[in-house]
Image: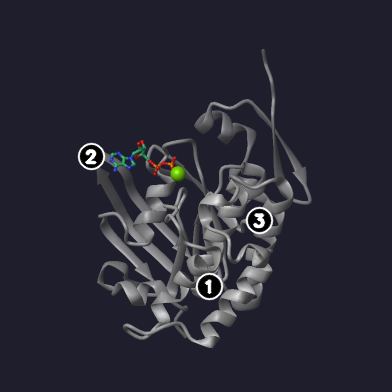
Amino acid sequence: MTAPEPVIATRDVRVELGGSRILDGIDLTVTAGEWVAVIGPNGAGKSTLLNAVSGLVPATGDVRLFGRDVRRMRHRDRARVLASVAQSPIVPPGITVLDYALLGRTPYLPRFGRESRADLEVVRDVLVRLELLDFADRVLVTLSGGELQRVFLARALAQQTRLLLLDEPTSALDIGHQQDVLDLVDDLRHDHELTVLTTMHDLSTAGAYADRVVLLAGGRVVAEGTPREVITEEVLATHYQARVRVIDADDRPVVVPVRTR
Ligand code: ADP
Ligand code: MG
């Protein structure tokens, strides 16, 4: 029996932007149901890697989603297999939460067609799960940062894809909403064999949720493995120039900054 196609497979991916090499030699494989967190210092290339995986930046090398070359996929087909939330999505003026979340159903609508009752049901369920139903008629620009971040996620979840790419999905959320959102993503992963690739700012959070961690620095993968293998005092000192203690909590690393001056 042959092994199933990985959900994401990149080979020797290289990205150049504005005349600089931003990513180099990226080989990344993510299998069905896995949660992989990309970590790394500011400017390491994390967002660019997510954009390369979704075919949004020109890259050389190979990027395959479910075995298909992402650059050969039609926009609509790609949007049925991959949903992503950018680090700072554009907030369209005047649009309500409900209408924004309904955009997630676009890849399923007939050409020139309207959303069906079933599409509205999907969106309603997502809004309920993200505690956004009371906000359905609010205009996006009136929301707080944390509410907005959940609305962006709602649009992506409404796409009902098997692959979710999230670029720092919890950076604007308080600690309770962080846990709610990440637990929800984890539940979806178990219920629907969702595969998750996310960048994470907070290393303890990355370590708490991801099966595997990929550390980028200077556009290259410099460490990869379980959270405990990658999130260590030595690795963080080398690649973040950070002075930290790493404490073990149920086999998951917890990172505590240490003040030395
Ligand atoms: P991260 O998400 O890890 O903070 P990014 O992927 O956003 O890093 O950016 C990696 C590097 O690429 C940064 O130095 C950034 O300034 C640079 N970069 C990103 N986009 C462009 C662009 N369009 N033109 C030139 N440089 C870019
Ligand atoms: Mg980024």
Q: Is mark 1 on a helix, strand or loop?
A: helix
- Which of the two labelled residues, at mark 1 and mark 2, occupies the earlier sequence position? 2
Q: What element carries label 3?
A: helix
Q: How many labels does the image show?
A: 3
Visible in this render: residue 93?
Answer: yes
Give the quadrant of ligand 1.
top left
Residues tagged 1 and 2 counted as in contact (Cβ below 8 A): no
x, y percent for residue 235: 56, 35
x, y percent for residue 35: 57, 61
Q: Which residue is drawn at the image coordinates 33% and 63% (left, top)?
A: 63
In the image: residue 12, left or right of residue 83:
left
Q: What residue type is labelled 3?
A: Tyr
Q: Which residue is drawn at the image coordinates 42% and 48% (left, top)?
A: 47
- Which of the two labelled residues, at mark 2 and mark 3, occupies the earlier sequence position? 2
Residue designated by label 3: 209
Residue lying at the far right in this picture: please name it: 250
Q: Which amino acid does label 2 sit on?
A: Gly
Residue designated by label 2: 18
Q: Is mark 2 within 8 Å of ligand 1?
A: yes
Residue designated by label 1: 158
Q: Which residue is drawn at the image coordinates 34% and 76% (left, top)?
A: 76
